[in-house]
Image (cartoon, rainbow, N blue to C red):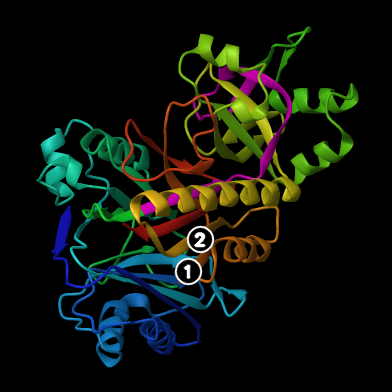
Amino acid sequence: WLTAMMPGIGGRPQFNSGTSRRQSITHALDEAVRRAATRLSFPQATPPLVLVLVGRMLMDLDGVQEITQRALRRYGWEADGVSIVGGVVDSVWVDDEWSASGIGVFILSGQDISQSQFCVGPEANLDWSQSQWREKAGCMGSIDDITGMLLFQDLLVENSATILSGLDFAFPEAMKAGLLMGETLGSSGSVFYQGDLRERSIVGIAMKNDSLRLTPVTSRGVRPVGPILEVVEVRDDGMILSTREVGTSLLCQGAPLSLLEMWEANDTITSDERRAAERGLMIGIIHTGDLETEARHANREPEWVDYIVRKVTAFDSSKAGIAIGGEIRVGQLIQFLISDPRATMDDLSIQLGRLKLESRLSTTKDSCTSLGYLVLIDSERATDPSQEVRLIVDTLGPLPMIAVRCPGQISSITGSPHRPDSGALTLPFSNFETRGLFGATVCFVFSSS
């Protein structure tokens, strides 16, 4: 573990962002910082947070820290002691189009904005005490001081569940959010920490400012097909070999793909749904607690079902089995999910409208001001991601923004009977469980009160 502390600075909180698309990492970073600097309304001391997100086609990433510091000085910031956080994404939204050689820069600054940065990898251990976890995250004061965490996960992390569970154990009141980084070309690792690329690690930023809020809005854009299934048999390698229908008259049992074919034959699902499953099939794990509770939810409408979405990662053609990204156990309830472009836009529009209404009420009550937003879109979304970015801008307004495409997101969920990763949650909150999300779009809105 390594920890870097940076103090807050004077002045009203500001969120500055800039994007650029160049062949050279030096020119791209310089241009992105210059664009961010044009948003300044007053002189800045050392910014407490500089986040750099780089498209996967850019090369020579080892000098990102020094290049960014030079650019900050050139455009009006004091850069001594600045530590860069971020990493590699699949593509960045630059000048109204997606670019794998693009770059996005966040600069967050203002009065009393304080945060600590940490990096943890294979050494994480669930046997650590709360004080050990808090020490490693650089947060030894009251846990109430932490209003939230931004997390950046290397794609090759093997113990992410351990790390996320440990952070939940140490900071149960802080919501965690972040993204999975993409693959790099010619570099080892995909997350920046203290100027270096790290692999098999999760880099975190612990926010320590009550006046700074991070509100995530999540749209999954998937819909269920076929009955809910109980997992009957799982092979040692995680392949689901047998499932049983729940809540149907026949309670058919068989291999997952065999049931999918049977449903098409007896018109339980349509031919269009079957073709959509062939293009992009996902699994929703119904996560509502004990099996009895899950069974009661099985016959409810989809919006009442608490799905944890997982991508299908492998097939066994001889057994008609499937494997998913993540742990699965016998007795859990699952359901096939397909990506639906229309559902994607409808869901996002509803969640953004809800956030806009809540923001107006919050502004009246708490004098809350939106500063900007970070948009994370799963690279395998069924819809055109450009439409989603434009919908977000049209709904929330022309605030500073960085939008990227990435392999997945990280978000905290609750035990609510509603879908936990839909709608807006404002920090702080309680009783979180932090998990990876797939197939989603998440818009993180930064605001101050």
Locate residue 443 relative to residue 33 in the image: left or right.
right
What residue did someone put label 2 on? 375
Q: Are marks 1 and 2 in contact (CB under 8 Å)?
A: yes
Q: Does the magenta-highlighted stretch encompass residue 435?
A: no
Distance from label 1 to label 2 (Cα)?
Answer: 6 Å
Label 2 packing within 10 angstroms: few (<14), some (14-19), many (20+)? many
Quadrant of the rendering where the C terminus is positioned: bottom left
Q: Which residues are magenta?
A: 214-242
In which quadrant of the rendered view does residue 111 lie?
A: bottom left
What is the three-letter code of the residue carrying label 1?
Ile
Q: Does the magenta-highlighted stretch encompass residue 232?
A: yes
Task: Give residue 402's mark.
Answer: 1
In which quadrant of the rendered view does residue 431 lie?
A: top left
Locate residue 366 relative to residue 335 in the image: left or right.
left
Locate residue 68 relative to residue 10 in the image: left or right.
right
What is the three-letter code of the residue carrying label 2?
Val
Taking the spot 26% from the left edge, 56% from the top edge, the residue there is: 211
**Which of the pair 44/389 is nearer the observer?**
44
Provide residue 244's location: percent of width, then percent of height. Answer: 67, 14
Q: Secondary structure at mark 2?
A: strand
Q: Earlier in the sequence, mark 1 or mark 2?
A: 2
